[in-house]
Amino acid sequence: MAESSKEELIQLIKRVGAYLTLKMSNLLSISLRNLDSRSVGALAGLALAVVFTWRLFRSPGARQRRQPKRQAPTTSSSGDNTQLNATAMPTGVCSPLEDLGAQNVVDEFFQPVKPTLGQIVRQKLSEGRKVTCRILGVILEESSPEELQAKQATVKSSVLEVLLEITKFCDLYLMERVLDEDSEKKVILALENAGVFTSGGLVKDKVLFCSTENGRTSFVRQLEPDWHIDTNPEITSQLARFIKYQLHISPVRTERTASNVFSSPSLEQFFGCV
C-alpha cells in the first residue's frame, strides 16, 4: 500500500474510533438492557467494516475529479498559482465532506434499536418471574362480577399480545371473584377462545376463583408473586407491605400509595402497546 494510503487509513481509523466511542456511549446508556455484549460487538464490527470498505474502494475517478488541475506556470498567472497552492488540500488529509460521509455510514448502523415487546415486558417487570393478576377490568372487558353474570365474558383484544408475552417467561396466575359457577365457565371459555392456553405458559389450573375480595388477597399472599396486578385500590394498599411490586389498573389517575405501587389506565398501556 502506498505511503499516502497508509496515512489516510490511519487518520480514518482515528476519526472513526473517536466517533464510535461517542456513539457507543450514547447507545449503551439507552439500550444496555436490550443488547448483550455480542450484539454490540457485532454492530461495531459491521460498522467498521463498512466504513473501511467505503473508504478504500471509492472510485479513483471521483478522487481525481476533486483534485485541482495543474496549470502551466506563466508570468501572468503567478498570483493565481500562489492562491491555488494556499487553498489546495494537503496529501493524505480528508475533506470535511469525506468525514461527513464516514459519519453518516456509522450513524446508519447506530440508530437506536427498538426493543421488542418481550424485552419491554421483561424490563418493565424488572425480570420478575411470578405474576398474579385480576381478570375483570384487566383481561376482560367486563369490570364487575355482576356484569359477568349478566352476559358472556370477552377478552380485550388489545391486552392479548401482552398477556401472551408475560406467559412466555413468567409464572402467571389469574384470579377473580365470581358469583356462581356459570361465571367461572364463562371466564375459562373466553380465555380458551382467545388462545391464552395454547401458548403453553398458562394452564387452566392457574385460573383461580373465589367468592370474596379477601379471598383474592389470600391467594396473592399464599403465592408470593414478584408482581400483583389489580383494579381494587384497597387490595393494592393491603398488599403493599408484602408484595415486591404492584400495578394498579385504573382509568382515573390516582395518587401513588407506595413506592412499590405503579399505576396505569390499562395493562397494555403500562407496556406501551397503546
Image (cartoon, grey):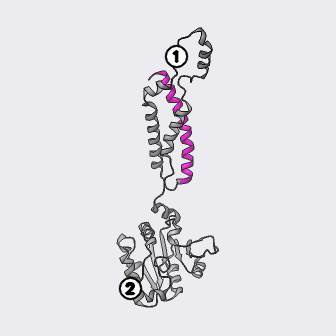
Crowding around mark 2 (Cα neighbors within 10 Å: few <14, some 14 to 19, many 20+) is: few
Residue 210 x/y as whole percent: 47, 86
Q: Which residue is mark 2?
A: 185
Q: Residue at x 37, y 81 (%)?
A: 189
Residue 104 makes an appearance in the image: yes
The number of discs equals: 2
Q: Residue at x 56, y 42 (%)?
A: 21
Where 29 falls versus 178 (above or below)? above
* Distance of label 2 from label 1 (alpha carbons): 90 Å
Labels 2 and 1 touching (C-beta < 8 A): no
Point out the residue furthest to the front here.
Answer: 76
Q: Quadrant of residue 248?
A: bottom right
Which is nearer the N-term, disc 2 or disc 1?
1
Could you say whether the residue bearing mark 2 is in a helix, strand or loop? Answer: helix
Where 40 falls versus 3 (above or below)? below
Question: Callout 1, which amino acid?
Answer: Arg
Q: Is residue 21 magenta?
A: yes
Q: Which residue is mark 1?
A: 70
Where 14 falls versus 132 (above or below)? above
Residue 219 x/y as whole percent: 49, 81
Asked if residue 87 lies left or right of residue 274, the reply is: right
**Range covered by the magenta-colored residues:** 1-30
Asked whether 249 or 224 is in front, the reply is: 249
Could you say whether the residue bearing mark 1 is in a helix, strand or loop? Answer: loop
Query: Image quadrant for the N terminus?
Result: top left
